[in-house]
Image: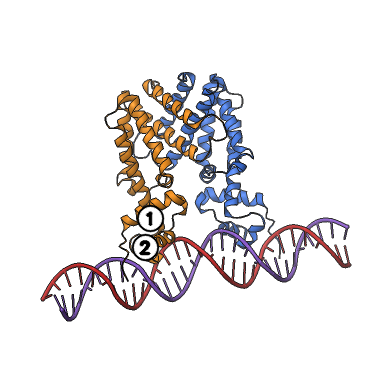
Chain colours: A orange, B blue, C purple, D red
DNA sequence: TAGGCTTGCCTAGAGGTCCTAGGCAAATCA
DNA sequence: TGATTTGCCTAGGACCTCTAGGCAAGCCTA
């Protein structure tokens, strides 16, 4: 009997693709085992349990998202950087719905400390560099920006904006205008 | 054998309490049946399936959230209304984490048409009345406001803001200042 | 290249959740 | 009081999670 050549990384990548296809909540150990043509019990030598698999998937997605965001803002500043950053963020969420859902998982502090979340925060800070904000305004603005982007793509995906005819794309562009305007003139504390 | 006196509504309320206690994802038909001391098969005369139960829970939560938001903005306008609305929204999310998670469920259009989502949008519009925005700016602003509030409370609950010492409460107040400032001077299209 | 060791995938099986089919008895109604 | 409806039951199948223990493939060493 030939071996399937599994590893935690290969399982995580396959789980990510599966998540994009069938939804994050449908990523199961059994489905993953079927994909590789092995028995589900075989996966437990590579992953601790189903939750472990989901955490690995979340870390992978956060890392990919940071990569794309970093590429998007390279060589840009100010509103250019903001639009590129937000666009990369939203595009990732649309093209990889399962992976994006995974990024919303509540990770325990130990896992967060492994990197990708921090990197995300650093990138957001880089976007704001052109707006000349100083602490603590910068942190407040980072949180605000992150909240608005995350909230927008989440609500958009949940269909919360479909009840009104106004185009979602047009609202998105105006949201970016609004963010730029707000960051350019962040209200004094 | 005495009957337990179940009904779809009683099940939904119990499911909501259960969600706040153990998390939305752990609301199962079995757990609910255990809570009432009956067999899980008995619940299927009241609910169609597990998904139906979760949808009912989402509708309940959206309705409660709308009630609290409506009470908060009654008799207020402008920034007062904004702060009260946002506060009610955030408080509900903190006090009822399971219910709030339920509100994030993707509801199919038929369910959305039953009311609570629309009501939520109407309330957001009411908050903006004092800012004198006209279509399509108003819709864009409704979406922006909703995104920022939802994003903030979601990220806050996921622990995304814990990595930095700046107080989450202080950032929240500044976010409200920023929203007020932005809505007061919504950038021209 | 032969023996031993590690490792990868296996079978077996227990326990949990979801859900359907069909039955009996309690509550309600004629 | 008898007939009908309703509520909860048992039985059981399908799927998912995870553990224990086994066998053989592939690697290391001599």
Mark closer to the chain start, 1 or 2: 2
Tell me if residue A125 comes above or below residue B46 in the rendering.
above
Where is residue B142? Give x, y as percent. Answer: 52, 28
Q: Which of C21 and A151 is in front in this view?
A: C21
Q: Do the residues labelled 1 and 2 touch (CB within 8 Å)?
A: yes
Q: Nearer the viewer, residue A34 or B126?
A: A34
Q: Distance between the residues labelled 1 and 2?
A: 10 Å
Q: Which of D6 and A102 is in front in this view?
A: A102
Q: Mark 1 points at which residue?
A: A53
Q: Can residue B81 be seen in this view?
A: yes
Q: In this view, does B121 lie to the left or right of B159?
A: right
**Residue at disc 1, secondary structure:** helix
**Residue at disc 2, secondary structure:** helix
Q: Mark 2 points at which residue?
A: A43
Snapshot quadrant of residue A180: top left
Where is residue A114? Give x, y as percent. Answer: 30, 47
Where is residue A160? Give x, y as percent. Answer: 53, 37
Tell me if residue A136 comes above or below residue B17 in the rendering.
above
Q: In this view, does A132 lie to the left or right of C27?
A: left
Q: In this view, does A70 lie to the left or right of B136?
A: left
């Amino acid at each position: 009997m030939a071996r399937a050549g599994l590893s935690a990384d290969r399982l995580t990548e396959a789980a990510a693709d599966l998540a994009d296809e069938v939804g994050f909540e449908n990523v199961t150990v059994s489905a993953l085992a079927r994909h590789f043509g092995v028995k589900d019990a075989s996966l437990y030598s590579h992953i601790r349990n189903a939750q472990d698999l989901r955490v690995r998937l979340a870390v992978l997605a956060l890392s990919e998202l940071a990569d794309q965001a970093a590429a998007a803002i390279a060589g840009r500043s100010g509103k250019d950087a903001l639009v590129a950053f937000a666009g990369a963020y939203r595009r990732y969420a649309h093209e990889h719905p399962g992976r994006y859902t995974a990024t919303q998982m509540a990770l325990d502090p130990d896992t967060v400390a492994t990197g990708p979340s921090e990197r995300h925060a650093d990138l957001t800070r880089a976007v704001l560099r052109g707006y000349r904000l100083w602490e603590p305004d910068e942190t407040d603005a980072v949180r605000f920006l992150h909240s608005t982007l995350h909230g927008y793509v989440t609500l958009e995906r949940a269909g919360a904006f479909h009840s009104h005819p106004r185009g979602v794309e047009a609202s998105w562009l105006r949201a970016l205008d609004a963010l730029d305007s707000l960051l350019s003139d962040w209200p004094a504390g």
